[in-house]
């Protein structure tokens, strides 16, 4: 199931693969369509298609009907303490009717006085006609303890943000962190989805039972998305110390441990804890180099590890302090395809944006670093001769290496 909600609130709602809306794990609203030929119950239909709009918490479910689709969109807004909006759009050439299985929701207008006919729906169901290319809006107002609260008036409901406004709001909130435009399109979508999941969830906790790597990566994503770092600095420092001790004891550093230590330094730096940041950096420099995994399957389920894995494939900080662009090289399927990355975490003090443009078989690299001067940029897997301490610049690299990034 997919989740909708509002950043920083205590409530969430889930949407089933066929568009039922759940709050606090309980089914709260089901929908049915009366089209020109018959009644459609989405839970039992084979033509259901569902997606997250732009990867953000706006869930679109499409049901095939004569002449086109019945389109349901579900999203959360912060108005009135929290509202789940359910829009039904008639993307077909014929009118149809939508039925909801409860009457205590907020709706744009009064239901049809003839009620439900031709199908056995739950008691209390209500029906609304929806004209060609028209929209019917309903809403569930969330009160204390995730319970349905009072109804909204028709004017209040009509004034709520539309799904496109909510989509733009989420995208704008994510722009403060990194973004990518890559031949591997799924990476950009995953960055959006996982960061939205983080913002809709409770922060990780740091205790004896917690995953220290997951905790640091979760907090780091929150800080990069605008949360204040000072409240997490102490717990992040303790978690980083435990990871460092484990790596020193095992004499090996996993890719996610390496990213967590790097991320901890960033959080401490943004919290103004320069001494702690420098202590972490000094110990980290003496650890073995990590081997970045190329396989992504294990990380897609982790909201915190997934963005870190994607960034680790695109930039790395080496033990000598160098920023290494495309540390795993360029995959064969990417050759000849322009791509770019923005605001990747390169060191605790630096972010980097770069683009690759092709001149025949040779890649041209353009880069821009945000942070103190003096850091060195390399692209060791593509051109071992390239090295620069310029904060921004461009160069034509001498070759490429493809290593089968997946």
Image (spheres, rainbow, N blue to C red):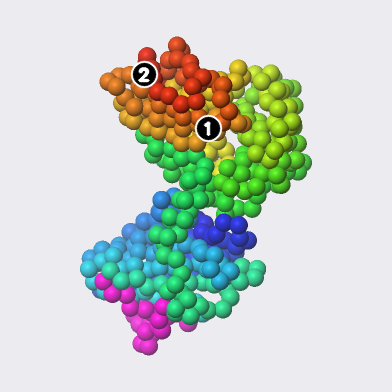
- Looking at the rendering, the stretch of residues picked out in magenta corresponds to 108-132
The answer to whether 63 appears left or right of 103 in the picture is left
- Can you name the residue that lies furthest to the top here? 385
Q: Give the main secondary structure of the magenta stretch.
A: loop
Badge 1 element: strand
Q: Which residue is mark 2?
A: 396
Q: Quadrant of residue 274?
A: top right
The answer to whether 37 appears left or right of 271 in the picture is left
In the foreground, 175 or 34: 175
In the foreground, 313 or 103: 313
Residue that appears at 40% across and 26% down: 366
Residue 126 colored in magenta in the image: yes
Q: Which residue is mark 1?
A: 370
Question: Residue 212 appears at what percent x and percent y?
Answer: 69, 38
Q: Quadrant of residue 345?
A: top right
Residue that appears at 65% across and 18% down: 288
Do residues under tags 2 and 1 come within 8 Å of each other at their CB atoms?
Answer: no
Question: Residue 114 appears at what percent x and percent y?
Answer: 36, 87
Mark 1 Cα within 10 Å, few/some/many (few <14, many 20+)?
A: some
Q: Is residue 352 above or below residue 199?
A: above
């Amino acid at each position: 199931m997919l989740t909708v909600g509002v950043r920083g609130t205590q409530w969430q709602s889930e949407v089933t693969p066929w568009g039922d809306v759940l709050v606090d794990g309980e089914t709260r609203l089901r929908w049915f369509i009366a089209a020109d030929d018959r009644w459609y119950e989405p839970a039992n239909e084979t033509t259901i298609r569902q997606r997250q709009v732009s990867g953000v918490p706006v869930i679109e479910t499409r049901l095939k009907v004569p002449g086109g689709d019945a389109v349901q969109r579900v999203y959360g807004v912060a108005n009135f303490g929290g509202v789940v909006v359910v829009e039904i759009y008639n993307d077909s050439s014929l009118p149809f009717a939508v039925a909801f299985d409860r009457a205590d929701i907020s709706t744009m207008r009064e239901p049809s006085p003839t009620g439900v006919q031709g199908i056995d729906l739950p008691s209390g169901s209500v029906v609304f006609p929806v004209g060609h290319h028209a929209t019917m809006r309903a809403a569930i107002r969330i009160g204390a303890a995730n319970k349905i609260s009072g109804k909204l008036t028709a004017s209040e409901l009509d004034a709520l943000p539309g799904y496109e406004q909510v989509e733009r709001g989420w995208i704008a909130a994510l722009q403060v962190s990194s973004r990518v435009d890559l031949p591997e399109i799924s990476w950009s979508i995953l960055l959006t989805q996982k960061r939205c999941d983080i913002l809709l969830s409770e922060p990780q906790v740091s205790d004896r039972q917690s995953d220290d790597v997951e905790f640091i990566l979760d907090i780091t994503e929150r800080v990069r998305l605008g949360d204040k770092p000072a409240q997490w600095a102490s717990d992040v420092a303790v978690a980083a110390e435990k990871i460092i001790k484990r790596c020193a004891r095992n004499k090996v550093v996993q890719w996610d441990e390496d990213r967590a230590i790097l991320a901890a330094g960033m959080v401490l730096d943004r919290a103004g804890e320069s001494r702690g940041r420098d202590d972490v950096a000094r110990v980290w420099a003496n650890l073995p180099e990590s081997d970045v995994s190329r396989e992504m399957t294990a990380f897609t389920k982790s909201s915190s590890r997934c963005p870190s894995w994607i960034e680790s494939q695109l930039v790395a900080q080496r033990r000598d302090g160098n920023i290494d662009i495309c540390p795993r090289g360029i995959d064969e399927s990417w050759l000849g395809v322009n791509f770019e990355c923005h605001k990747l975490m390169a060191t605790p003090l630096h972010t980097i944006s770069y683009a690759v443009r092709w001149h025949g078989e040779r890649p041209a690299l353009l880069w821009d670093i945000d942070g103190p001067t003096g850091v060195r940029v390399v692209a060791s897997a593509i051109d071992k001769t390239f090295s620069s301490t310029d904060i921004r610049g461009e160069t034509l690299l001498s070759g490429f290496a493809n290593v089968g990034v997946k």
